[in-house]
Image: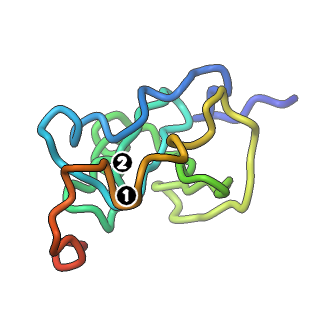
Amino acid sequence: MTAIAGIDPDVPPSGKGCVECDATSGWWFHLRRCAQCGHIGCCDSSPGQHASAHAAATGHPLIRSFEPGEEWFWNFETSEAFESGPVLAPPEHHPLEQPVPGPSGRVPADWRSHLN
């Protein structure tokens, strides 16, 4: 397989949820995985927008959805979406029992009003 700059298929995800939200007892709408280092961050609809903040801070432009059934990639530098890409180290998504939004017990009842 040809190497793709910005993607390391051997790096596992950093965890089951957004790194920054977990550190601050926050919550997320959907999760994104950095294709280069495995950092799990929350999507731009989430209050924290940690996936795009990670890309900006590190220069890692490519993310993959960390949602079950989704295999798409996004390039923050070019604003291009790709329906699929290389297979990344498992797991490919957050645990199926983890609710969306999540995680369980930290999502406010009025969560919809907090989305970006």
33 or 114, which is in the foreground?
A: 114
**Whole-Å distance between the Cαs marked 2 and 1?**
6 Å
Asked whether the beta carbons under mark 2 and mark 1 sit within 8 Å of each other, the answer is yes
State the mark number for residue 102. Answer: none
Is label 1 in a helix, a strand or a loop?
loop
Residue 25 drawn above or below residue 99: above
57 or 87, which is in the foreground?
A: 87
User: Is residue 54 toward the left or the right of residue 61 in the image?
Assistant: left
Q: Whole-percent x and y of residue 17?
A: 37, 39
**Label 1 neighbour load within 10 Å: few <14, some 14-19, many 20+:** many
Q: Quadrant of the C terminus?
A: bottom left
**Label 2 neighbour load within 10 Å: few <14, some 14-19, many 20+:** many
Q: Whole-percent x and y of residue 26?
A: 17, 47
Quickly name the residue at label 2.
51
State the mark number for residue 43. Answer: 1
Instruction: Look at the image and name its color scheme.
Output: rainbow
